[in-house]
Each structure stands twice: as structure tokens, then as C-alpha cells.
Amino acid sequence: MTQDVILTGGRVFRGLAGGFAEALAVRDGRILAVGSAAEMAAAAPDARVVSLEGRAVIPAFNEAHMHLLPYGLALGQVNLRAEEVRSLDEALRRIRAAAEAAPKGAWILGRGYDHGELDVGRHPTAAELDAAAPDNPVFIVRTCGHMGVANSAAMQLAGVGHNTPDPEGGVIERKGGALTGLFQERAMRLVRDVIPAPAIGLLVDAIERAGNHLASLGFASATDMNVGMIADMAEIEAYREAQRSGRLRQRMWQVLAGNPEGIAQLAWEQGLRPMQGDDMLRWGAVKVFADGSAGGLTAAFFEPYLASAGGGTGVFTFPDEKIHALLKLYHEQGWQLDIHAIGDAAIEQVLLGMEAADTPAHPFAGRRHRIEHCGFVTRDQRRRMKAREILPVPQPVFMYEFGDLYIRNLGHGRSDHAYPMRTWFEEGHHPAASSDCPVSTVDPFVNLFTMITRKTNRGTVMGPEEALTVEQAIHCQTWCGAYTQFAEDRRGTLEPGMQADIAVLSRDIFATTPEDILRDTRCDLTLRGGEAIFDRHGALA
């Protein structure tokens, strides 16, 4: 039995329904009581008291859509994210430095470049990667994760030549008949399949590394959205080993890779079943991709991208009959469907498949199927989602990081209405705000800032009528995430009896500016079940 703890002297956000309190008490991993300081002292007279000194307490953040293990691995790869890399020369310099430090023939992997933010306004080429790393295979992935560039050595190992056909749902770019090195959507598997998979120990290290970082930001729950995308079935064992060895920091809702090249069917054949596991590691869903990304011009739309951006209507990952068969299969197996669809045409394809799968023998009621991202959704699609309790799982941070690129690709009209948080909120959906990390930063304060301002990182305001209050934004990043994971009865609010998953922030974000939330707010203490998984100042040491 652990010592009781009282947090007092600040503002405690109980949740959207409960409002605010002055203090709370924790006992045996759960919220014992919430109320005034005097009431907490009476409820837990022997508790250890932590003075908040005006800081805010909120339910711990729930990262409802990210790729935790790949993020942990990416922390050890070449960082090409736009906040640090704005020029092609800098990107190539970092790749060159990594190659010079690596053995000859070792893979050089990089993550996070944004061709729209590079000074040249385009993707790097295979020839440029060849010059930077002449003795190593190189593969760098765009920030969206839906396309990447390989050098000549990597393409040779993948067996890709100028006559290699495009795979279904993928594109191998050529210009003048020559390979540029760019692989889009399912074509990326041609390269990924020849990259050596990390050993189990390295996978566990990555899980712990990512989990520690999330804990430092206030997350007590998270998701790995495409388990098996890097090391196949070994990822399942790595998560189980992380749990056994006490290296799993967050409560995990696990989503199996469900495309034909994924592991969902093999995992099923080996006995993995929906809701298997416990409150720390639960196997709950299967993911299928319907399209790509709006920033990368591969999200599937009814209306084309602007001609100035290249036109076209994007890329469907599968034809209708194939994706509909996958949705039916996984739905009937009992999995939650977590289906990637960004453009309105892709969302329509997914909805039609879901509606066809909703039968008297296998009803949708209570299943909480999800459309991941759901960025450019029509009014009729929202109505049909609500009718079948299909949940949107959006990434407001996309507006912050990619909003100006959306405008460049699609124009203001469509872009301003992307990720319509207030509309979803007012229509009674439960939009689980998340990051898709490592596609975007996992920093929850960037997401909060975007939800309450609708500003991009360049200051462009997009659809201000879709902005939320601070309380609503926190609700979307806490309770709504728990709801998508069938856990709202245990976490997502700070009410008596709930799990003591708590974040103590460095300031009272309910009484400050959005800019202060973005730039000057951090997490000081994260509790998971009353246990400190991050303690910046040693408050519970």
C-alpha cells in the first residue's frame, strides 16, 4: 500500500462535467476524493501533501493515435523535422554526418522532412542522397509517413529498377523514365522489407525511450497505431517483454497492422483476440489504410488538388471491393476498426464499407469503430458516422504544422473546414485529439494551442469558428481518448473512484494566454495509477 497523496493549492480540473476543485486526494492508485483543501485533509489525514502553488491539475493526457514504438526508434534516427531542417543542404549535411559515423554498408534512416518546408520546395532525390552517403543505403521518410526517398544502394537492395511496376495502392516516381527515389504509399514496403528488423532488445529499448518522453509531457495512456509495421510479430513480443520487465510507461491500446502486408491475420491465426490483455497492455483494434496525406497530395478527394499544386485527386490504397472485404473481416472477428482516411473520397469509401458490414448478425452498436484523421469530412458523412457511433480520431496539430501546406494544395475553402473540432463537439461526436507522432510533434501543448486558436505555425488562422475552449480541448485530449478505448469509466476525469492518472502542469493554463500554453507550459508531475512515472522536481521522491 502506498502513502496517500493530496494535491492542493491550485486549480484541479475534474473534467468537462465536474468543473473545478481546489484539491484532490489519492489512495491506492485511485482518486479518493475531490473538493476543498479542508475536505481533503479530513479524508486523508496522514497523506503526503504536495503544494501546487497555483499550478493546474488535469487528467493525464491520452495519446489516442500515435506510433509509439516507431517513435522510439525514430529518436535514434537522423532527425529531419521541419522545426530544425529548413534547407536541402542541412538535410544532406545530417545524412552525410550519419553516414560518416556508420560502418560501410549500414542503413542510414531518417525521419520527418517536409518537402513543402525545404528551401527547394521539393523532395530530395536519390542522386543527392547518393552524393551524401555513397557507401550506405539510405531511406528517409517524409513527416506524414506516407512517402519516402531511397538512394540507389537502397533501391538496388530492394530490387527496384526503372521497369519495376507500381504496386497496388502505391507509386514509384519516375521522371523522364528514370527513378527519382521517391516511393509513395504501399510502394514504400518495397524498401522497408529489405531494411533489417531491430532485435527484440532494441524494440524494448525504443518502447521505454518513447514512453519516458511521453511521461515527461503528461501522458499516462497511449496507442501504437500500426503494430507490426517495422518488425512484424516481434513487436507483439517486445511489448509483452516491456510489460513483464516494468519498462512499459503508459497504459497501451494496441492496434494491429491490418493491410494484407500487416500482421493482423497472422496474429489471429496464432490466437490473439480482441480485448486480450489487461489495463496496461490491451490488444483492441486493427488498422487499414484507405488513402495517404493531404500534405503529400495522396489523400483521396472528390475534387482535385489545385492545379498549382499538381492537380490529381490523390491515391486510394485499395479498390472498393478489397478494402470493404477487409473491413468486414476484421469487424466480424470482433476487432475495433481504426481506419485511416483523410480525404472526403476516402472517408466515403470507408463509410460505405462500414455500412455494408453493419448487419443484424454483426451489428455496429457498441463497437466504437473509428475513422482515423477524418480530416476533410462532409456534413452527410458526419451524420452517418453519428448514426452508427463511428468515432473521429483527429490530429488538430496537423493544422499547426501543415495548415499552410493544406492551403497551398487545396485552397482556403476546403482547408479552413478541415478537422472541424467544434462542429464534432457540438454534434455530439467524441473527437479524440491526438498527434500521429512521429508524423507530428507529440507535445500536447501544441495540440491544445491549435484547438483553441486554429492557428498554424506561421500564424495563419484557419476556420476560427471551429476553435474550442481550453476545457473542451483538454476533454478531447483526455476523456475522448479514453472513450475510444472503452476506458472512460476508469480514466479521463478526476472523480472519486477513477484511476489516479494525473498531470500537474507548470502553470494554470485556464488563466493564461494561448501563446503561454504553447511556449511556456510543461508537465511537472505525471501519475499513472498514483505512481509517479515522471517527477520533474522530485515532489514525490
Image (cartoon, rainbow, N blue to C red):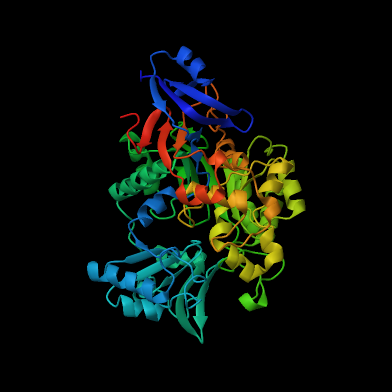
Horizontal relation, residue 133 to residue 416: left or right: left
Count every numbered label the image shows and give the total: 0
Answer with the quarter of the image where residue 191 lies. bottom left
Answer with the quarter of the image where residue 161 lies. bottom left
Pick the front one: 520 or 441: 520
Residue 238: percent from left, percent from top: 35, 44
Q: In percent of the image, x 72 and y 41: which residue is there?
A: 359
The image shows residue 166, relative to residue 230, as above or below, that is below
Horizontal relation, residue 273 to residue 156: left or right: right
Residue 129: percent from left, percent from top: 36, 76
Q: In percent of the image, x 33 and y 69: which residue is there?
A: 94
Residue 470: percent from left, percent from top: 59, 42
Looking at the image, which residue sits at the far bottom?
176
Answer with the quarter of the image where residue 298 lies. bottom right
Pick the front one: 503 or 30: 503
Residue 79: percent from left, percent from top: 37, 62
Pick the front one: 491 or 39: 39
Residue 75 seen in render? yes
The C terminus - image quarter = top left
Residue 152 seen in render? no
The image shows residue 60, relative to residue 95, as above or below, that is above
Horizontal relation, residue 246 to residue 63: left or right: left
The image shows residue 261, relative to residue 483, as above or below, that is below
Q: In percent of the image, x 47 and y 54: which residue is there?
A: 441
The N terminus - image quarter = top left
